Amino acid sequence: MADSFDLIVIGGGPGGYICAIRAAQLGMNVACVEKSDTLGGTCLNVGCIPSKALLHSSEIYAHIPALAEMGIAAGSVSLDLAAMMGHKDKTVDELTKGIAFLFKKNKVTPISGTAKITAPGTVQVALNEGGDTTLTAANIVVATGSEPAGLPGIEIDEERIVSSTGALSLPEVPKQLLVVGGGVIGLELGSVWARLGSEV
């Protein structure tokens, strides 16, 4: 027996979760299937939000030497990268919990798993916790977002060659860093690591 909804949203990123919440506010019985264990998609978990958190922290760190010129004595300053990463992670965690709260408040059913449309109005979900479930709905919205793209012939190993996701969680400031791609995330992450002392 399949669970039946008015709307199934596949993808819990900015397009998906906003669609799911608004549809529920308009009276629809809504399920949102997200393959990650957290809502918010790339932007919230491994894109815009963590990048902005690191940009802010690194900007403050980079401006400290100039404070003396403004009459502000800051004393000795050191970088605690683990604490900076902890602040970034806390920011992301608080915002993902906010989306989960909005789902609960608006009675959106969150489902953690990978969705596959198997027939008109039918979605099979391989649940993250194991097993499958079948969902049906008159309406399905696909809002699956994006993932970092690789380059032909270059393997992203997340150690020496990292994706934007990996660059958000480096355990130490690299001596040198080459950023391939001049989009928003590439520019932001290049700025973060340059401010923290890497030759970018």
Image (cartoon, rainbow, N blue to C red):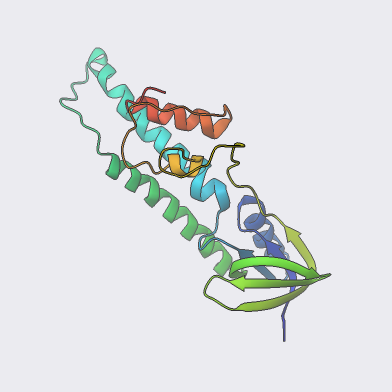
Determine the residue located farthest toward the bottom in the rendered image: 1
Vertically, is 110 above or below 173?
Answer: below
Determine the residue located farthest toward the right in the rendered image: 120
Please report the residue visible at 44 percent of the width from the left and 27 percent of the height from the top: 191
Kindly tell me whether residue 29 is visible in this rendering. no
Residue 157 rendering spot, x and y as whole percentages = 46, 44
Q: In which quadrant is the N terminus drawn?
A: bottom right
Residue 148 sits in which quadrant?
top right
Q: In which quadrant is the C terminus drawn?
A: top left
In this view, the residue in front, 127 or 26, is 127
Residue 87 rendering spot, x and y as whole percentages = 34, 46
Please report the residue visible at 49 percent of the width from the left and 57 percent of the height from the top: 96
In this view, the residue in front, 135 or 96, is 135
Q: Is residue 90 left or right of residue 110?
A: left
Please report the residue visible at 65 percent of the width from the left and 61 percent of the height from the top: 21
Q: Is residue 135 left or right of residue 103?
A: right
Residue 103 rendering spot, x and y as whole percentages = 58, 65
Q: Is residue 61 left or right of residue 145?
A: left
